[in-house]
């Protein structure tokens, strides 16, 4: 997983989601638009973050997930979780 580039700036933040309120689209492969980066921030619990069906990371309050533009990815709640996503460009 790569890091956010230094030149990007935050422009939006999602609502806080839980294992019960996570949008179904986030659970299957999807991607951000060209030039749009994301940062998955877990407040409580754990999320499994899969990048291009080959790289898997366990995210928690101490480990954030970087979403690169146009790269297919999906998440899976691992039990009780709350998280949000910051968007950058």
Image (cartoon, rainbow, N blue to C red):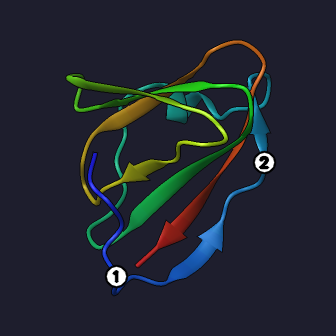
Is disc 1 surrounded by few (<14), some (14 to 19) or many (20+) residues within 10 Å?
Answer: few
Does residue 35 appear left or right of residue 18 in this picture? left
Provide residue 40's location: percent of width, then percent of height.
Answer: 55, 49
The number of callouts visible is: 2
Q: Secondary structure at mark 2?
A: loop
Farthest residue toward the top? 79
Q: Nearer the viewer, residue 70 or 54?
A: 54
Q: Which mark is residue 34?
A: none
Q: Residue at x 27, y 40 (%)?
A: 72
Question: Where does the C terminus fall, quadrant-wise?
Answer: bottom left
Q: Is residue 66 above or below residue 87?
A: above
Is disc 2 surrounded by few (<14), some (14 to 19) or many (20+) residues within 10 Å?
Answer: some
Q: Is residue 19 above or below residue 65?
A: above
Res. 83 image quadrant: top right
Which residue is under mark 1?
6
Q: Nearer the viewer, residue 82 or 29?
A: 82
Q: Is residue 20 above or below residue 25?
A: above
Q: Residue at x 33, y 63 (%)?
A: 33
Does residue 42 appear left or right of residue 44 in this picture? left
Q: Which-is-in-front pick, marks 1 and 2?
A: 1
Q: Which mark is residue 16?
A: 2
């Amino acid at each position: 997983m790569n890091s956010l580039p230094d030149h990007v700036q935050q422009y939006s933040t999602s609502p806080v989601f839980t294992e019960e309120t996570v949008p179904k689209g986030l659970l299957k492969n999807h991607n951000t638009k060209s030039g749009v980066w994301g940062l998955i921030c877990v407040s409580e619990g754990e999320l499994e973050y899969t990048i291009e069906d080959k790289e898997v990371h366990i995210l928690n309050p101490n480990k954030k997930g970087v979403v690169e533009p146009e790269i297919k990815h999906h998440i899976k709640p691992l039990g009780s979780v709350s998280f949000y996503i910051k968007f950058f460009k």
